[in-house]
Every structure is written in structure tokens, then in C-alpha cells.
Image (cartoon, helix red, strand yellow):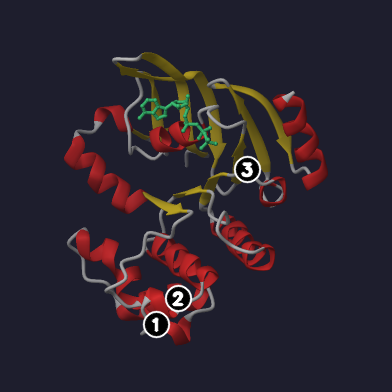
Amino acid sequence: MNQAAVTLDGLTRTYRSRAGSVHALRGVTHVVQRGTFTAIMGPSGSGKSTLLQLAAGLDRPTSGRVTIGDTRLDKLNETALTRFRRTSMAFVFQSYNLLDSLTAFDNVALPARLAGRRADRAGVLAALAHVGLRDQARRRPSELSGGQQQRVAIARAVYGRPDVLFADEPTGALDRGTGRDVLELLRSLTQGGQSVVMVTHDPLAASFADGVLFLADGQIVGHLARADAGQIAAAMNELER
Ligand SMILES: Nc1ncnc2c1ncn2[C@@H]1O[C@H](COP(=O)(O)OP(=O)(O)OP(=O)(O)O)[C@@H](O)[C@H]1O
């Protein structure tokens, strides 16, 4: 089996507007191994969100390519890409992105239903149980705390057992303790062979990852393996000087 979960090969992304061109990514090459948790850090505007969007197939690179497992995203048309995203990848955002008119259960079941599959009741409940919310299945997001809502979003993301979970500041809106629970949950997914790629500004959040990639000005400028929050903060300070 291919041990590479995400392969980024010479990725560039240039945004063009009347005001001029912005080179958000300037040639990023990196491999995320299967079953690992990677954090991406860097100063504001360094290209972190752009990188995540390209890796998740939500946007196309100007040049270079993204491969998820053995599948090259540039070989897929929009329909095939949407289908592939629904089965192989999931995305967790800072703002949870749950539908308030649906219960926790129906939010978790939604991607499968959108993909034209029946959501199996036992599987959805198991996903909710995995994030400690088995008893809240009938509640709507507005009846849950922020941390619980983010756990519903993670249950939704893991229900289809995607190979890769992308997360953009997943703990940005949570207090420390709740954030820690969410990060431990993300880390636990790797034991089942899933990969997690997370953008964060928070060195403590990044310390839960197996490795941290540092971006500056659209390029990878450093890498730390299994570092504590102090080491990560020191590396960030160096970058921002
Ligand atoms: N749609 C867009 N059109 C034009 N420029 C963009 C667009 N999206 C991002 N940019 C620019 O590309 C660069 C990288 O942006 P990106 O959002 O990837 O950075 P980031 O590291 O995620 O920043 P932050 O930490 O502030 O969220 C920035 O200069 C940004 O202004």
C-alpha cells in the first residue's frame, strides 16, 4: 500500500486581480505519511489556508500537483473531484459549519446522504459515541456548547472514514480544556491509519501533532518533529523576527 497519504509536488498558487498578482504559494513540496498528524504554522499571510485548500481539492494550484493516496487531483474533473472528496477527505473548520436546522445525528449523516448513500444508523451513532456525544444525537447545534459542536463536526468528518482529515484552526474558538479534548480526538484518529493535517496559530495545539511544517512567504522554511509548545513557539518567533 502507498504510505503517502498526501503528496504535494511543486505547488504554486498565484491570485490575480486588478490590483496585481499575489504569489500565495511559491513551490511547496511535501509528503504527509499515512497515519500521521501534521500541523502547519506560519505568520499571517504565509499561505497556510491556501495550502490546505489546494491539498483538500477545494481550489486548484496554478502549477504543481496534489496526490491523495494514489489519486492525482488534477486528473479529476469537477464531478469526479467532488465525489472523491466526499469519500476520501473531510474538512473541519474553526466555525464548525453545522446546519442549525438539523440534529447532531442528521448533521453527521448529511455528507453520506449528499453522496447518495443511506446513512447507517449504527455507524452514525458510533461516530457520535467516538466523540462522546452518543446521548446528544437528537440535539440541534444551538443546544450544544462550542466544544460539543466541534465534536459533532469531527464525528461528521470521521463517519465516512476518510483517509485524510484537513482542519483549519479547529480549536480557534474553544477554551484550552475543550481544545485539548478536540486535539486528543484528532490525534486518536491516526491510530486507525487516518491522516490529519491541521493549520493552527497555537503552539500548544501544534504540540499534539507528530510534526510541524513552517511556512513563510509561500514556502516551507522549516520542520520540527514531535516538539513541545515551547520549542514550537521559539521556532515561530524566529520566523516572525
Ligand atoms: N482569494 C484571494 N485573492 C487574492 N489574494 C488572496 C486570496 N486568498 C489569499 N490571498 C493572499 O494570499 C496570501 C496567502 O493567504 P492565506 O490565506 O493562504 O494565508 P494564511 O497563512 O492562511 O493567513 P492567516 O494566518 O492570516 O489566515 C496572502 O497574501 C493573502 O492576502
Query: Mark 1 or 2, which is nearer the eye?
Result: 1
Give the CA separation, mark 3 to mark 1: 31 Å
Residue 76 in picture, x, y percent from top left: 23, 33
Mark drawn on residue 101? none
Question: 138 and 1: which one is in front?
Answer: 138
Question: Neighbour class for label 2 at 10 Å: few (<14), some, many (≥20)?
Answer: many
Decide: is 60 above or below 16.
below
Q: Earlier in the sequence, mark 2 or mark 3?
A: 2
Q: Position of residue 106 (x, y in %)?
A: 29, 74
As drawn, is 81 to the left or to the right of 220? left
Using residue 142 as the reference point, say whether residue 84 is left or right of it: left
Q: Kindly identify which numbered label has been placed on residue 137.
A: 1
- Residue 228 seen from this side: no
Which residue is at 68% across, 45% downward? 210
Label 3 packing within 10 angstroms: few (<14), some (14-19), many (20+): many
| For marks 3 and 1 on the same chain, the one whose residue lies earlier in the sequence | 1
Q: Hey, what amino acid is under mark 1?
A: Ala
Rendered residue at 62%/43% (across/down): 201
Q: Disc 3 beta carbon < 8 A from ligand 1?
A: yes
Q: Which residue is mark 3?
A: 201
- Which kind of residue does numbered mark 3 sit on? His
Asked if marks 1 and 2 touch (Cβ < 8 Å), the reply is yes
Where residue 130 sits: x, y (%)? 51, 73
Residue annotated with mark 2: 128
Q: Quick check: is the Cβ at mark 1 less than 8 Å away from ligand 1?
A: no
Please give left or right for residue 115 compared with residue 105 in the image: left
Task: Describe the element under mark 1 as helix, strand or loop.
Answer: loop
